[in-house]
Image (cartoon, grey):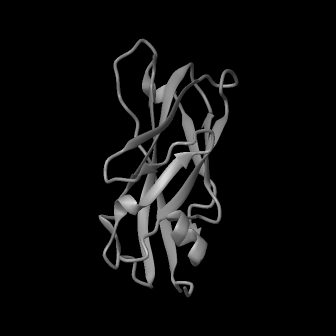
């Protein structure tokens, strides 16, 4: 079988959403940074072995880092979603899967936020800073995946609440 000659590319945007709550310590005083390394997710051209396995893995993961820059203890949540309804060429968005580097379970990306990880963080204390990596893979189907370039966008969101 010949190797399919297509590549899949993804882009990213970074969003930060902050939950507002009424607590003794005002949330406005809780400053937390989100940084993301290498937001572009690239896939190599799939080989026959990739099609036999049913997926092709991205060349690198996306690492996010949470850094509390001021304030007291708060709960931080990192979420992931797609802003693209599909990957083009008839390929559904659910064929793009993700997992945390410390977990083995793969999840299909969707248009709604999926919690990647949640940790309590305290400035210069517990979990400050903390980070993890999100790995991606593309589900492959020899019968339905046409050669071509596929693309989509995703959003990594940080939200925080004061416990």
Q: Position of residue 21 (x, y in %)?
A: 35, 23
Give the quadrant of residue 17.
top left
Give the quadrant of residue 16.
top left
Q: Quadrant of the N terminus?
A: bottom right
Residue drawn at 43 percent across, 21 percent down: 26
Q: Nearer the viewer, residue 55 or 29?
A: 55
Give the quadrant of residue 159.
top left
Q: Position of residue 126 (x, y in %)?
A: 66, 21
Residue drawn at 55 percent across, 27 percent down: 119
* Above or below 131: residue 49: below
Q: Position of residue 74 (x, y in %)?
A: 51, 22
* Above or below 25: residue 111: below
- State left or right for residue 63 relative to residue 146: right
Give the residue furthest to the top. Answer: 24
- State left or right for residue 67 relative to residue 94: right
Residue drawn at 58 percent across, 53 percent down: 135
Q: Position of residue 68 (x, y in %)?
A: 61, 32
């Amino acid at each position: 079988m010949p190797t399919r000659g297509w590549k899949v590319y993804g882009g990213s945007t970074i969003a930060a959403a902050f939950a507002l709550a009424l607590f003794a310590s005002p949330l406005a005083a809780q400053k937390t940074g989100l940084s993301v390394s290498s937001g572009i997710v690239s896939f190599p051209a799939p080989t026959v072995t990739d099609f036999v396995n049913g997926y092709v893995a991205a060349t690198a993961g996306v690492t996010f880092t949470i850094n509390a820059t001021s304030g007291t203890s708060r709960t931080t949540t990192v979420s992931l979603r797609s802003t693209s309804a599909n990957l083009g060429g008839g390929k559904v968005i659910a064929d793009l899967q993700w997992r945390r580097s410390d977990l083995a379970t793969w999840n299909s990306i969707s248009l709604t936020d999926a919690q990647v990880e949640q940790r309590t963080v305290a400035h210069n204390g517990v979990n400050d800073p903390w980070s993890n990596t999100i790995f991606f893979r593309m589900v492959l189907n020899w019968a339905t995946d046409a050669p071509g370039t596929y693309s989509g966008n995703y959003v990594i969101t940080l939200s925080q609440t004061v416990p």
